[in-house]
Image (spheres, rainbow, N blue to C red):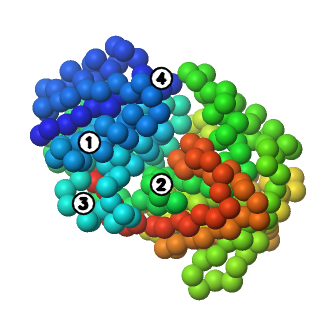
Amino acid sequence: MRAILVVNPQATSTTAGGRDVLAHALASQLKLDVVETDYRGHAMAVARSATRDGFDLVVAHGGDGTVNEVVNGLLADSTGNPGELGCVPMLGVVPGGSANVFARALGLPVDPVEATHQLLNALENDRRRRIGLGLADGHWFTFNAGLGWDADVVGRVAKRRGKETSAALYLQASVRSYFRPPLGRPALTVRIPGEEPAEVVTAFVSNTDPWTYLGDRAVHLNSGCSFETGLGLFALNGLRLPTVFTHVRQALLTKSDQHGRHLVRHDDVPMIRIDAAEPVNFQVDGDLVGQRTRVEFHSVPDALTVIV
């Protein structure tokens, strides 16, 4: 089996020693190439070449941003339909970031050594899983995307983070973005097929549940959402403190069924369109993409094979 190991040396919990151990272990079972990324988009370029060159497997060792780049590279030559590509390399993940949401949602260990052992065992026993993905404005996402408050938070964290990324940093950015939104709070109009349009001020779109993690605590917004269903929408039409506290509390309860009079929520939908009165921040898988006034989010089932 031909494989490429893509390592992000800047990820929070990656080390040169850990990379060497991982590469040595994988090379015992695979015909392996190793690439260390050194610029934004490098992992995507490597994964795109792997698809074109007929590789069997791409292993991402880094955080959620590295995984997202690899996924977008694997499917870069598709037009929203992975089936048209024919054979797409399988994806393997060895977590190396701070949150590792995608890996944890798949049930993978967050410790790189344990994750490497599980990956090798999965390869030996041919354990694989087909998952659905989200596609928004040409960007594939594995676990979440959003417009408004969460994207503002991602933008603030991106300006400050490095090896010191932590839950405390995200909490601080959340508070600052709440009281001082960088782009204000433009009105958002949410449209879902078969439903009346809804006016909101922030919108979260999930491809699975949990939506993210706060340290060791899972954050649940759409408990009916999974890699085998359509997308989940969690949107609020107001952000007064009582509303925020109510939904933060519900989100941190195990498998809480989110509800409230200021909440617009849908699980398992094929498409969501969001229009903004003015440009708002837009993020996918925890990375700020830019600003948008309209984004369509599509669920793409059975899009990718993951080694688990």
Distance between the alpha carbons at the discs numbered 4 and 1: 22 Å
Q: Quadrant of residue 77?
A: bottom left
Kindly identify which residue carries mark 4: 10
Distance between the alpha carbons at the discs numbered 4 and 2: 23 Å
Identify the residue at horizontal 14%, vertical 38% (top origin).
2
- 74 with respect to 95 (left or right): left
Q: Position of residue 256 (x, y in %)?
A: 63, 59
Kindly identify which residue carries mark 1: 49
Q: Are marks 3 and 4 in contact (CB under 8 Å)?
A: no
Q: Are marks 4 and 1 in contact (CB under 8 Å)?
A: no
Distance between the alpha carbons at the discs numbered 2 and 1: 18 Å
- 171 with respect to 16 (left or right): right
Say which amino acid is labelled 2.
His
| Nearer mark to the viewer, of 3 and 4 | 3
Distance between the alpha carbons at the discs numbered 1 and 3: 13 Å
- The label on residue 257 is none
| Residue in front for this viewpoint, 61 or 87 | 87
- 20 with respect to 259 (left or right): left
| Nearer mark to the viewer, of 4 and 2 | 2
Identify the residue at horizontal 25%, vertical 26% (top origin).
34
Identify the residue at horizontal 48%, vertical 67% (top origin).
298
- The label on residue 85 is 3
Q: Position of residue 211 (x, y in %)?
A: 57, 52
Q: Secondary structure at mark 3?
A: helix
Q: Secondary structure at mark 4?
A: loop
Task: Point out the tag, 3 or 2, that comes first from the N-terminus.
Answer: 3
Q: Are marks 4 and 2 in contact (CB under 8 Å)?
A: no
Q: Check the picture and name the quadrant holding the N terminus.
A: top left
Identify the residue at horizontal 52%, vertical 72% (top origin).
271
| Residue in front for this viewpoint, 198 or 125 | 198
Q: Position of residue 288 (x, y in %)?
A: 60, 44
Distance between the alpha carbons at the discs numbered 3 and 4: 31 Å
